[in-house]
Image: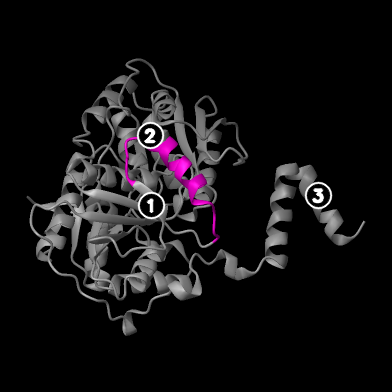
C-alpha cells in the first residue's frame, strides 16, 4: 500500500468514510477543476470603480408604481439571506410596485428549475422570475451581494436606471486578503444607493469607505419564533454551517467539546449541515423548518450565535424563544443588537464554554427563559421592509437617500 493509500486507511479508521469522501473530493477539485469555476463572476461582468461611467436616470413621477429588479444568485431551499431579501420584495409588491427577481447563475443553470425552488420556498412573493440577461425594462435595479453589484454595474452601464445595493454582510470578510476581497471592497465605490440590514454594516461602511447608508432594522418573525416551553430546559443549540467560515463552526465545536467535558448531562442540539461531525455526543437534526427549529430552541437554555461579518439572525430567534445567545464580542455587532440578555464573549473556546456553563448553571432556568423572551422588542420585519421600500421610492423619485430608515 502506497503512502496515499495508508493515509486514506488511517483516516477511514479514525474518522470514518465521510472524512475519506470529503478528502477525495477536495483532492479532485484541487487537481482537476479549473480554479476559475470557483470565482462567482464571468469575466465580462467584473466592474472597475476607477473606470466606471454609469448612465444616470431621470426622476420617476411620484406615486407611480415602479419596476424594481432584484439581482440574486439562485437560492437553495431555506436560504436565510434570500428569505430576508424576498421579504423586501414582497413588501415592495404590497406597496404597489412591480418586482422582478433576476437570477445570475454563472454556471448556466435552468432558470425554470431555479424558479420552482423559489416558488416552493417563498410562496408569499409573486414577482416575475427570469435570468439577469435583460435589465432594460426597469426603473430601479437592486444588487444583493458583492458579485451581483458587479453585474448591476456592468450590465446597466448604458441604461437609464437607478441602482441600489441591499447589503446583509460585510462581504470582503468572506474572503482572504486577495482578489475576491479587493473586488468585494470595490463595490462600495460604485456609488450605488446603499441599504444595510442593521446599523453594524452602516457604521462599517461609513468608517471604512465613507458610504452613507439607509438602515433597515433587524427583525424577527415572532409568529414563528416564540417561547412555548414554560417548564424545565436541558439543552444547547448549535448551528453547523461548514461552507461558511464566518459562522465559526470550528470554534463552536471546540467550545462545545470543553462545555461537554464540564456538563455531560446537557444535550447538545446541532442543526444545519447534516454531515457535520464533532467529537462529542450531539442530537443532530440536519436542515429543519423554522417551526421545527422553534421546537428545538424551546428545549434549550442557551445557544451559539457566532458570526464574524454581521450579527446573525439566529441571535434574536434564540432570544424570542427564551434562549440565551452566546455571541462573539464585536463593538459594531453590539450596536446592532443592544440586548442585555446576549452574552458577548471573547471568541475563544474557553470563554464560550464559560458563558454556556454560566447559563445552564443558573439557579432559576424558567425565570431566565422568561426574562430572555421578554427582552425581544422587535416589531417583526415590517419596519425594515418599510424603510427599504421608502428608500427605493425616494431614490427613484428624487435621488435623495433617506438616512437610517427614518420617517
Sequence-wise, the earlier of marks 2 and 1 is 1
Residue sitting at x 44%, y 23%? 234
CB-based contact (under 8 Å), mark 1 and mark 3: no
The magenta stretch spans residue 176:
no
The part of the image, by quadrant, that contains residue 283 is top right
Viewer-side residue, 7 vs 113: 113
Label 1 – label 3 distance at C-alpha: 35 Å
The magenta segment is 107-127
Q: Is residue 118 left or right of residue 208?
A: right
Marks 2/1 in contact by CB < 8 Å: the verdict is no
Question: Residue 346 shows which numbered tag?
Answer: 1
Mark 1 residue crowding within 10 angstroms, few (<14) / some (14–19) / many (20+):
few
In the figure, is residue 217 to the left or right of 36? Answer: left
Q: Can I make out residue 181 in this image?
A: yes
Where in the figure is residue 22, as x and y percent of width and height? 69, 50
The answer to which image quadrant residue 138 occupies is bottom left
Find disc 2 in the rendering and name its residue: 358
Amino acid at each position: 500500500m502506497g503512502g496515499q493509500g495508508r493515509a486514506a486507511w488511517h483516516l477511514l479508521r479514525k474518522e470514518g468514510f465521510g472524512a475519506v469522501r470529503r478528502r477525495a473530493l477536495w483532492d479532485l477539485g484541487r487537481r482537476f477543476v479549473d480554479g476559475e469555476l470557483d470565482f462567482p463572476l464571468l469575466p465580462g461582468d467584473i466592474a472597475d470603480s476607477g473606470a466606471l461611467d454609469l448612465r444616470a436616470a431621470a426622476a420617476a413621477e411620484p406615486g407611480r408604481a415602479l419596476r424594481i429588479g432584484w439581482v440574486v444568485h439562485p437560492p437553495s431551499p431555506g436560504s436565510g439571506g434570500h428569505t430576508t431579501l424576498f421579504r423586501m420584495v414582497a413588501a415592495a409588491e404590497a406597496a404597489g410596485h412591480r418586482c422582478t427577481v433576476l437570477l445570475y447563475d454563472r454556471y448556466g443553470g435552468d432558470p425554470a428549475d431555479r424558479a420552482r425552488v423559489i416558488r416552493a420556498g417563498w410562496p408569499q412573493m409573486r414577482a416575475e422570475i427570469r435570468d439577469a440577461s435583460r435589465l432594460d425594462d426597469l426603473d430601479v435595479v437592486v444588487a444583493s451581494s458583492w458579485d451581483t453589484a458587479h453585474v448591476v454595474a456592468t450590465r446597466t452601464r448604458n441604461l437609464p436606471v437607478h441602482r441600489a445595493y441591499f447589503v446583509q454582510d460585510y462581504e470582503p470578510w468572506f474572503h482572504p486578503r486577495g482578489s475576491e476581497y479587493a473586488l468585494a471592497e470595490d463595490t462600495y465605490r460604485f456609488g450605488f444607493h446603499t441599504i444595510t440590514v442593521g446599523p453594524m454594516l452602516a457604521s462599517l461602511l461609513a468608517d471604512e469607505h465613507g458610504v452613507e447608508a439607509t438602515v433597515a432594522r433587524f427583525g424577527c418573525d415572532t409568529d414563528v419564533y416564540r417561547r412555548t416551553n414554560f417548564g424545565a430546559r436541558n439543552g444547547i443549540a448549535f448551528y453547523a454551517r461548514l461552507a461558511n467560515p464566518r459562522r465559526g463552526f470550528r470554534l463552536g465545536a471546540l467550545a462545545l467539546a470543553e462545555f461537554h467535558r464540564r456538563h455531560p448531562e446537557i444535550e447538545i442540539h446541532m442543526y444545519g449541515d447534516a454531515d457535520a461531525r464533532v467529537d462529542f455526543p450531539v442530537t443532530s437534526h440536519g436542515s429543519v423548518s423554522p417551526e421545527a427549529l422553534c421546537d428545538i430552541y424551546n428545549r434549550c437554555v442557551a445557544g451559539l450565535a457566532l458570526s464574524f461579518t454581521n450579527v446573525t439572525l439566529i441571535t434574536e430567534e434564540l432570544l424570542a424563544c427564551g434562549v440565551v445567545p452566546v455571541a462573539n464580542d464585536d463593538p459594531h455587532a453590539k450596536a446592532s443588537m443592544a440586548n442585555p440578555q446576549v452574552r458577548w464573549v471573547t471568541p475563544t473556546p474557553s470563554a464560550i464554554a464559560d458563558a454556556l456553563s454560566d447559563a445552564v448553571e443558573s439557579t432559576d432556568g424558567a425565570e431566565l427563559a422568561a426574562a430572555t423572551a421578554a427582552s425581544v422588542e422587535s416589531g417583526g420585519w415590517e419596519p425594515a421592509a418599510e424603510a427599504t421600500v421608502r428608500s427605493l421610492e425616494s431614490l427613484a423619485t428624487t435621488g435623495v437617500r433617506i438616512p437610517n430608515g427614518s420617517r
